[in-house]
Amino acid sequence: MSANPVPSPAMVRKVVIASVLGNAFEWFDFAIYGLFAATIARLYFPADNPLASLMLTLATFGIGFAVRPLGGVLLGLYGDRVGRKKALSVTIVLMAVGTGMIGLLPTYAAIGVGAPILMVLARMIQGISAGGEFSGATTMLVEFAPAHRRGFFGSFQMCSQALAFSLGAAVAYLLTTKLSAAQLESWGWRLPFLFGILIGPVGWIIRSKVDESPEFLAYRRSAVSASETAARTPLRDLVRKYPREMISSTGICVVGTVSAYVFVFFLPIFAKQRLGIATADANLATFFGTAVILLVCPLAGYLSDRYGRKAVLLPGMLGYGVAAWFFFHHFIAAPSFQSLLLLQVGVSFFMSFIWAPVPIVLTEVFPVGVRSTGAALTYNLAVLLFGGLAPFVNTWLVKVTGSNAAPLYYVLFSLLIGVVSTLLLPQTDGGRVRAQAASQAP
């Protein structure tokens, strides 16, 4: 294969901005459903038992994840066939449609059973979009990055998710503190969803300004028959040729996705519903926790370039497990804003060392021709099996066991999967490439 064309520094900056901002817009839209779950439960899933109503809402939250593997495979195949840039444009338009539907949807009191049905449909559209977004944006970032800085560049994918969660928590905090309960339930909760409609045209414009991935273009040019190669099935090639890569990278995603959907989405609901923490306080603690991830992820990505992926992942996972155990027990023993803030910030620091290497791990283990599909499938399978239903499952676990510590065991189980998967992760040439590039750098 001929050497890939080197993109200009200006184009690399454009790609980083387009990937980070577009991805942040997408995840902001996806996150605010979880942050306003209690309000949506009352308006769209009314029930005599508030817990049953909330669980229906969280199950609908999970439906968005159930279709993510489908969206990931379809949009991943599309990205591997026609290019990363076109696939990213499709994902952002789909997310705007799904989010706009939620913001404009009449309530159960207005149209009856049609309201929850349409809510489920909107979540499915969001899920298909989110399924393709991660792999598309990650692949784009990594393929434009210098070989010895791919971990650092890939970490910006996770920074964008943390940015989205921080913005979502900040918006939820402002709305719950500035509006009355009646205003919030009547129209206030709709504002972030209506704002989300803007991501369609804005995101499309941002992403239309970047070039196609140089690595993908080089792959297409070097193929014996570009059209024939692109028409083959990356999905079949993945299963046949890269089973170890798929299993290990999926397992690493499990611990990362559980950390997100337990501590970013479930914990604020749990703190409010079970332990009596004020809604504004729960949202504010979530904001500070995700802000820590936003700040620390680039450092963790840099360290993964310097010392290797496993050298960052394994200590990060062990620190995360210890912090989760200690701070979670402290919080449920003495629930307060201070103990919740300590839990969110303490756990988030170590979560950063798990989150940051995930994008490069998912792309580095797969060759260019199946990279987008491979990253999409492994990531979305992990999210489907352990992430999307985490708020629902943990709410159910607390109810069945009667123990407020039950979610912690779900976290530790995912951690065990992550450690084993990291140990099984195949060696890539990333270390050699990093060393060579560093030695050749001026």
Image (cartoon, rainbow, N blue to C red):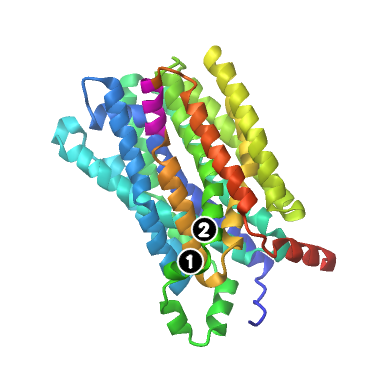
| Amino acid beneath label 1 | Leu
**Which residue is located at x 39 percent, y 54 percent?**
69
* Label 2 crowd (10 A; few <14 / some 14-19 / many >=20): many
**Which residue is located at x 70 percent, y 46 percent?**
312
Q: Is residue 403 magenta?
A: no
State whether residue 327 is above or below residue 16: above
Q: Residue furthest top?
A: 334
Disc 1 element: helix
Q: In this orientation, does residue 177 appear?
A: no
What secondary structure characterizes most of the magenta part? helix
- The circle drawn on residue 238 is 1
Q: Which residues are magenta?
A: 391-400
Identify residue for label 2.
246
Q: Is residue 399 magenta?
A: yes
Q: Position of residue 123 (x, y in %)?
A: 32, 45
| Amino acid beneath label 2 | Met
